[in-house]
């Protein structure tokens, strides 16, 4: 019976070979951005990456909130937040045409400490360039999204608006339109990462081959008798 179970499980396996951490930051914030316009806005920020073959399935998003450099100006722990994975169909690390693949809800944790919170998500397959992003609605804080300014991958984006639609990042209600942090004279990389592993969707073996495998197991059991 154990042989039969093993044979069937083999036909529906998911291949996993280790982890890839997608990151452009050094883990320490040099400042944080947030309500630098009319307050009470929705604030969206995203970090772009290019797929690595060993990490084509995103399994978690790692994110920090606020900065220890801005005490009293960080988002409160427990604040609702949404996390996103987007495909970049033109592979230009520009989310103007980004396609939403997945959305997950969580809350702010360890705010103002540069601590990364690892949020497990439903495994999401990516191809080519992609983005992970976060959205906090109705913010009143100056320092929501921490940014590392040691280097600049020119792949950090932000947008703000009222009732901002994560499916329509160039909507008409933008208070500050979708743009890179670099173009806003704040070069750097968000403390926002993705973790991926190599995998593929479960692919069932044709029924005829499965029956053949089951038959071999049954024959082996019969011979033992």
Image (tube, rainbow, N blue to C red):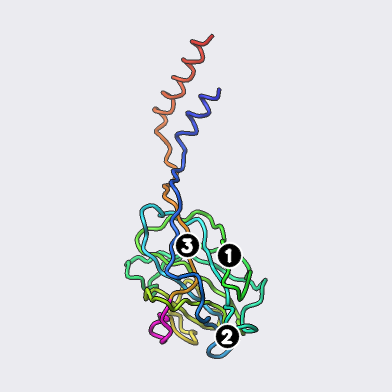
What element does badge 1 sit on? strand
- Say whether marks 1 and 2 touch (CB < 8 Å): no
Front one among 118 and 176 = 118
Assign the N terminus to one quadrant of the image: top right
Identified at 66% across, 73% down, the residue is 77
Where does the magenta region start and end?
Answer: 179-188
Residue 118 vertical position relative to residue 77 in the rendered view, above or below: above
Please indicate whether residue 48 sits to the left or right of residue 224 in the image.
Answer: left
Q: Is residue 41 left or right of residue 155?
A: right
Q: Which mark is residue 160?
A: none
Q: Earlier in the sequence, mark 1 or mark 2?
A: 1
Q: Of marks 3 and 1, which one's residue comes earlier in the chain?
A: 1
Calculate the distance from the C-alpha at mark 3 to the C-alpha at mark 1: 11 Å
Task: Give the percent coordinates (x, y) of residue 170.
Answer: 43, 79
Q: Neighbour class for label 2 at 10 Å: few (<14), some, many (≥20)?
A: some
Asked whether disc 3 touches disc 2, contact meaning CB atoms under 8 Å apart, the reply is no
> In this view of the protein, which residue sits in the foreground, 46 or 204?
46
- Residue at 58% x, 77% y is 66
Question: Residue 188 placed where, x, y %?
Answer: 42, 78
Q: Nearer the viewer, residue 219 or 70?
A: 70
| Image quarter (top left, top right, bottom left or bottom right) of the C terminus | top right
The residue where tag 2 is placed is 142
The answer to whether residue 178 is magenta is no
Rounded to the nearest angstrom, the CA distance separating label 3 from label 2 is 25 Å
Q: Which mark is residue 117?
A: 1
Residue 140 in the image: above or below residue 216 = below
Q: What's the CA distance linking mark 1 and mark 2?
A: 20 Å
The earlier-in-sequence mark between 3 and 2 is: 2
Which residue was labeled with disc 3? 194
Q: Residue at x 47, y 71 (%)?
A: 167
Q: Quadrant of residue 56?
A: bottom left
| SS category of the residue bearing label 2 | loop
């Amino acid at each position: 019976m154990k042989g039969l179970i093993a044979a069937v499980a083999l036909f529906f396996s998911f291949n996993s070979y280790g982890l890839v951490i997608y990151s452009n930051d050094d883990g320490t914030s040099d400042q944080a951005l947030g309500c630098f316009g009319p307050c009470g806005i929705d604030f969206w920020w995203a970090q772009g990456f290019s797929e690595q073959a060993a990490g084509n399935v995103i399994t978690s998003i790692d994110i920090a909130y606020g900065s220890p450099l801005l005490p009293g100006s960080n988002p409160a722990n427990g604040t609702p937040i949404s996390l996103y994975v987007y495909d970049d169909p033109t592979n230009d690390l520009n989310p103007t045409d980004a396609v939403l693949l997945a959305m997950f809800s969580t809350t702010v944790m360890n705010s103002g400490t540069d601590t990364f919170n690892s949020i497990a998500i439903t495994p999401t397959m990516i191809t080519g360039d992609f983005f992970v992003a976060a959205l906090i609605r109705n913010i009143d804080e100056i320092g929501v999204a921490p940014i590392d300014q040691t280097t600049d991958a020119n792949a950090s984006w932000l947008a703000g608006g009222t009732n901002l639609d994560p499916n329509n990042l160039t909507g008409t209600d933008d208070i500050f339109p979708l743009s890179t942090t670099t173009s806003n004279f704040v070069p750097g990389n968000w403390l926002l990462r993705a973790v991926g592993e190599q995998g593929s969707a479960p692919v069932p073996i044709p029924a005829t081959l499965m029956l053949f495998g089951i038959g071999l197991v049954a024959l082996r059991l019969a011979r033992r008798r």
